[in-house]
Amino acid sequence: YFAIHLLAAQRRRLDAALAPFLLAPDTLREVRDKMRAELEYGLKREAQGKATVKMLPTYVCGTPDGTEKGKFLALDLGGTNFRVLLVKIKSGRKRSVQMYNKIFAIPLEIMQGTGEELFDHIVQCIAEFLEYMGIKGACLPLGFTFSFPCRQGTLVGWTKGFKATDCEGEDVVDMLREAIRRRNEFDLDIVAVVNDTVGTMMTCGYEDPNCEIGLIAGTGSNVCYMEDMKNIEIVEGNEGKMCINTEWGAFGDNGCIDHIRTKYDREVDEGSLNPGKQRYEKMTSGMYLGEIVRQILIDLTKQGLLFRGHISESLRKRGIFETKFLSQIESDRLALLQVRRILQQLGLDSTCEDSIIVKEVCGVVSRRAARLCGAGLAAIVEKKRENRGVEHLQITVGVDGTLYKLHPHFSTVLRETVKELAPQCDVTFLLSEDGSGKGAALITAVAKRLHNIDKYLYAMRLSDETLLDVMARFRREMKNGLSRDFNPTAAVKMLPTFVRSIPDGSEKGDFIALDLGGSYFRILRVKVSHEKKQTVQMESEIYNTPEDIMHGSGTRLFDHVAECLGDFMEKQQIKDKKLPVGFTFSFPCRQTKLDEGILITWTKRFKASGVEGADVVKLLNKAIKKRGDYDADIMAVVNDTVGTMMTCGFDDQRCEVGLIIGTGTNACYMEEMRHIDLVEGDEGRMCINTEWGAFGDDGSLEDIRTEFDREIDRGSLNPGKQLFEKMVILGLHKILTRLGVEPSHEDCIAVQHVCTIVSFRSANLVASTLGAILNQLRDNKGVGRLRTTVGVDGSLYKMHPQYARRLHKTTRRLVPDSEVRFLLSESGSGKGAAMVTAVAYRLAEQHRLIDETLAEFKLTHEQLLQVKKRMRAEMEAGLKKKTHDTAKVKMLPTFVRSTPDGTGSATGFPVWGLVRLSRSGATSCAKEISLLPCAGCWLPGPSKVTA
Ligand code: BG6
Ligand code: BG6
Ligand code: GLC
Ligand code: GLC
């Protein structure tokens, strides 16, 4: 009776001590929801450095696809064992992975010594392994499973049992590399650093492609999963997925689960290497469960419920309860006697009752761990389900860790909890049999390939310093191109366009626009009307231009253009009208007026003979005349950059730059007339077509051109020309073929990677040349901060998923003191060409009216002879005494009898000086002098009209 009574009292106190470990379903749901909120927060940009659940991007973008191959070394550090492995992967139909590994001990004093000691020890182990495997000389690629939180390769902070000094905030690869260098015995190619969760997910993903989550329930606790790129704010790009290492062990470090932590948890935390940190991990992972049990046992002993109230020396020892003992004690197959024996091994002298209580305590603690871990995992699978937008999700979780593998109940309780808290998810748990080293090797295989590409394409990465230098060089090129002296030899031609302003809203009429030189040849009809508001109506047709026409004779090309125009007019039923035509011709043309364009040279994919050096307006007019079935009035030739600027200027008055990044690349901008030597006049502004595609044609970009650029150039229609353009327009196909990657190949990751590097360079280069233009505009305006709009068009800018973002970002970085709006030209350059034509048309009309009105002021030769004759008679009358008094022309004597004869030195010199001065100044004066009549009403006829 006494004994039973005692047991009942024991029971109550025992229950009281263990009650906080029994989590109600509602509490678990709350934990799940809190975890979910922390996951979401960690993905946000603003959470950087603040989130407790860090959600670290791993830059692993896919699970294995069977194409991985090669021979690799792997290190596996941070779990129970430190392992060095050799992994041989075969791809293809007989794909297989062979592994050899060796476990090495890491003594406590090294785990908690200096960083140098730790990494020297690791390298020592590698050396032994290489020796043992007989591969000492081989410089193999190495993948490093490093089971601690790393942000882009840098150790954020130690967790679990490690605390080596001078490592936090350092680059893990650097530390390992240094240690290899210190040893100076062998070299290794360190390719990837991988968290154990990621390694585990990849190991399991090799067997099951549905495995998109990696879970570790071992010494530590953590999870990784494949997240949609669009949800990861701190990584650029929206396509595909990336693996996120959640580092959920730190969940609760902000206090959000403190209400479920017990006093025992707090004691464990305070006695740990990292107090206050990894609170969730300390409730759920193998390294700490034994400690929690020990704290409870001490408490129960103090209460006299255990070990006859005597706290033995060994019970005071931190860490005596390893996970493996926990697992053994809880094993159902074990008789009480055996439990006692284990306790005895631990130096705990127990009675039978003690054994029952110890077993119960262990059970409660491990059950809570499994339930909490299940609640966390439920949050992850639910998130995956919502990401996919499905009612029911089938997913595989790759798992590893001694707690999961060895504990008799942990895995079952974990699985039950996930089922309970995420009922819409059907979760398969796949145990990682081979550890995370295999996964690390798989990642290394992919990374190695990218690594090689990186080495190959290294020269394509341009630093900001280089970009600023390119910007300065381009600014000089612009200056040269604008100056009369340097223009003839300048690579960047800076062509005046005779377009003097962007649309002002007064344009109207019915126009035709041709748009030749981009990806498509388009003909448009543009109707601009003015009822209430200015509105534009457009209809267009795309015409095919076969390669043999682009590369045939010029006559054939323009016959083709004229034929398409005829067809278009036919369709529009305007063949009988003579509508004004604007011609977007996207090639470098020298212009002396708006309706003349001498093609300097073909660029891009065109190479028709007999056109270079000729006026394309004349050629088109000739082709139209030859047909004779319709008539057209070509009023303006404009470059596509100009057309784009005008199109965008129609919507935004601030637009003063036109940019094309498409089949070719180029920019135009509004320059001050006083800077343009090639055109007379200093007032106002004129649009300059820079033709920046030719930047570098004089060798000025040789230092940043790569072997790929040279190869692309050699294979082009115009070798040695348009060198900048060829760097900007991605010659991807060539590069991929050179790398042995056929674009059709399934090798998507490599392709994506190459594309990223090449397009990044392109956007950066354009940002630097555009930066030069923006600086020029700012200096022209004499303002501290430039506010302007750039009108942009071109398939690369429009279609590439990240191009525009990159361009905007780098531009902002290179020209910080500006506020640049990039306005996409939605309707092509045709609309702008029509605007130019409208202005030209209006001015032509104006001039016709002026001419009419002022017709009387124009004197004929006969009239002038008459005037001369009459004046002569008048003068004679004035000189004659007889008629002097009545003469109209008075002819008054002045009594000055001679002009200077050079002998009067005091007054003579300044007079000569004056004459000399005006002579030497003649050239510069000429511009102003000739300006005068031009600015007035003596304007040339309509054919010389400028807009
Ligand atoms: C091993 C993996 O199998 O499991 C390690 O290879 C991982 O990378 C470990 O860290 C986790 O379990 P534990 O119990 O050893 O910490
Ligand atoms: C179009 C313009 O939208 O873009 C053309 O109308 C221009 O004038 C073209 O040449 C540039 O882009 P791409 O990619 O067609 O060369
Ligand atoms: C710790 C580490 C984490 C690791 C986990 C499992 O939580 O911080 O990186 O994945 O342990 O080993
Ligand atoms: C080429 C042409 C240029 C055009 C550009 C974009 O560089 O030379 O005139 O603007 O391509 O189409």
Image: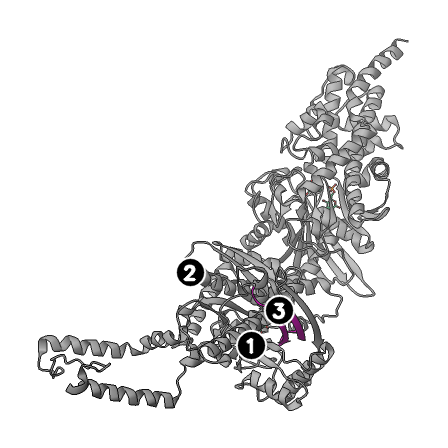
> Element under label 3?
helix
Farthest residue to the right: give it.
Answer: 1
The amino acid type found where label 2 is placed reads Asp
Disc 3 target residue: 831
| The N terminus: image quadrant | top right
Disc 2 target residue: 779
Residue nearest the viewer, comparing 898 with 167: 898
Q: Please tell me the numbered disc located at residue 613.
A: none
Determine contact: label 1, label 2, CB under 8 Å.
no
Q: Please tell me the numbered disc located at residue 636.
A: 1
Determine contact: label 3, label 1, CB under 8 Å.
no
Above-or-below relation of 563 to 132: below
**Horizontal side of residue 69 vs 466, given as left or right:** right
Determine if the C-beta at disc 3 is less than 8 A from ligand 2: no
Name which of mark 3 and mark 2 comes first in the sequence: 2
Residue 241 in sight? yes
Residue 497 position, x and y percent, is 50, 74
Residue 402 colored in magenta in the image: no
Residue range corresponding to the magenta coloring: 506-526
Residue 489 in sight? no
Above-or-below relation of 130 to 104: below
Name which of mark 3 and mark 1 comes first in the sequence: 1
Front of the two marks 3 and 2: 3
Q: CA distance from mark 3 to mark 2?
A: 30 Å
The amino acid type found where label 1 is placed reads Ala
Instruction: Give the image quadrant in which the ligand numbered 3 is located.
Output: top right
Front of the two marks 1 and 2: 1
